[in-house]
Amino acid sequence: MRYVTNLPYETKEEEHVTIPMSDGVRLSAHIWRPTSSDQEPVPAVLEYIPYRKRDLTAVRDSVHHPYLAGHGYACVRVDLRGTGDSEGVLRDEYLEREQADAEEVLAWLAEQPWCDGGTGMMGISWGAFAALQVAARRPPSLKAIAIASFTDDRHADDMHYMGGALLSDNLAEAGTMFAYGTCPPDPAVVGDRWRGMWHERLENTEPWVLEWLRHQRRDDYWRHASVCEDYTSVRCPVLASSGWADGYSNAVTRLLGNLDVPRKGLIGPWSHKFPHLGEPGPAIGYLQELVRWWDHWLKGVDNGVMDGPMLLAWMQDSVPPSTSYEERPGRWVGEPDWPSPHIRPETRPLTRHTIGPGQDATAAPSEGGAAMTVRSPLSVGQFAGKWASYNAPPDLPYDQREEDGGSLVFDSEPLTEPVEILGSPSVELDLTVSEPVALVAARLSDVSPDGAATRVSYGILNLTRRDSTESPEPLEPGRRYRATIPLNGVAQAFPPGHRIRLSLSTSYWPLAWPAPKPALLGVHEHSSTLTLPVRPVDEPDEVASSPFGEPEGTPPLAMTQVTPPEERWDVKRDLIDYRSELDIVKDRGTVRFEDIGLEAGRRAHERYTAVADDFTSVGGETTWTMRFRRDDWDVRVVTSTRLTCDETDFFVDATLDAYEADRRVFSRTWNEKVPRDLL
């Protein structure tokens, strides 16, 4: 990244500004704005998230908010209610109170003498969710949003219930917020009130995984703040981006296809990162794109930002399987609209060696013949990687050949010419199962001539939700059903000599929680199909080979690494007791923020276990330690959440401990049971 200090506007910074809410709670904001805005008001751009602006996101914030401020904007970073230095308690994600607070923040910003009355919202992940959800509420000052790594469907396309199947990230993310939501504010900001504010959080926090498990169907809990329920509610322009390695690779194209407002889409090879920090690379000059976006929609500059393709996507070249990449080779392609007139869906039956493009699929599929069957072991999924990759520690899927050993596998013939796909593949199965509850995981892989298999995309379906996630129904063993499994969106080039592989399994642990019992899946191959969104290789790319500049930002905040970070991703198998384990450590070490004299440490440890093929032996545990220290102020929060099951219930065992120095000042445990609902 190129760090820039010579910007068009001189800026000033207000590190802690309180914004009053209508119920008396005050939120904490960090504001960067042009010095000249005291006399010449400017638009305001809000980022609204729960991840602690004063310390834990301070370095990241220092790279992009001063940059945008230096281009003529008041950039405002607000801690959500109950997080960082804001008052109150954060009880769950995306609640009505959170969104009402955001509307009040926007109204407050629009009324400030340094603001010209126009506002925008930006962010990644939670910040992008917030911006899209608030846009659907149409606050009068909000003129445009720029969002990265988000979804419009909280139930099926977030880290909760992919295809109606419970994701392990449901537990992992709940553990993250259990830790962040119970940290104290900084006494240097809030004064002696810090201890009372902290204990209010500790005493009123429940592990969020409990609430998320209480809503296993798509109900009003998930419909709330899911913009897919009413796309017409969004009336402002939207710049939407994501990455193919992220868990949120699908919503960009859905917004492009369903919104009726000015909109642009951008999908790179990235994991869960802003595009200017994108990993795997290439990262792009995203902040320059934001300046153009805000200049047009907040200042009325006729700069051509809406010219060119509606969607820019990174067409990924074939690569060997790896759990991490520094760069993904490929090229940018552009689509004028979405759905794109360039994309041609090609549907192929699943007979052996007939799933590749160019095969004859005009004949009606046969309904007869014996089904191919599989009952997958729990080991299928150990090389699946993370639902939402952060590319650190290495968390992308590894070589799929071990996974394929417990799966039904369908290969194309070796390709005689290159094939490129852009969009969401899908699988339609004519199937039977032996149990009333079962799931199917479908994986699309690029198989090189030496046999290595790189996963390209995947999808999961809880078959009890094959027709409805609102009203699931148990399966009748032996009865034939048809079910469609959508796979995650992707742009992928398959070279000549490679094969395209579809793999089907009945388990995908620990990415997805397994069914109560192992199920035998029967697939009638001649009447089952794979549909690929083929983009002809001779189609013009409609975009320059390098449409973006080099990543830019302002110099990061000074920080010293006091103790080293640790990253670990271990797959273990004990061949005596047949216990398998995925052990993940994400330890940021301890860092010192030199400007405020604060040391902060974060350590997360996730462990997922199973024994042999006992589907009720699976368990997941996430433990977090958060520590903050300055002079004689030394506080620590330790949270632990464990999720286990039997055939009928889930069991949640959680602990929350808080310390001042080495003295424990708060402790609470939870031991809860939640019935399984066809899950």
Image: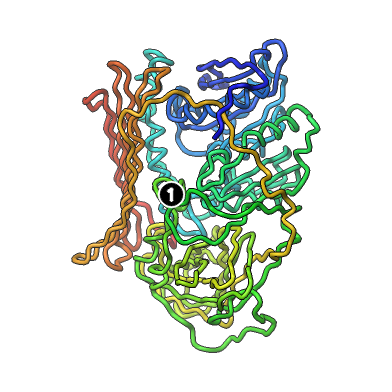
At which x and y percent is residue 254? 66, 52
Q: Residue furthest bottom?
A: 369
At which x and y percent is residue 176? 40, 40
- Residue at the image position 44 percent from the left and 26 percent from the top: 84
Q: Which quadrant is home to the C terminus?
A: bottom left
| Residue where numbered disc 1 is placed | 170
- 605 vs 222, left or right, is left
Q: Is residue 212 visible?
A: yes
Of residues 225 and 503, which is closer to you in this image? 503
Judge whether 245 appears above or below 353 on screen. above
- Number of residues whose C-alpha sits closer than 10 Å to that of mark 1, classed few (under 14), some (14–19) or many (20 or more): many
**Quadrant in which residue 177 is drawn:** top left
At which x and y percent is residue 663? 21, 25
At which x and y percent is residue 620? 33, 52
Q: Residue furthest left?
A: 576
SS of the residue at dot 1?
Answer: helix
Q: Amino acid at mark 1?
A: Asn
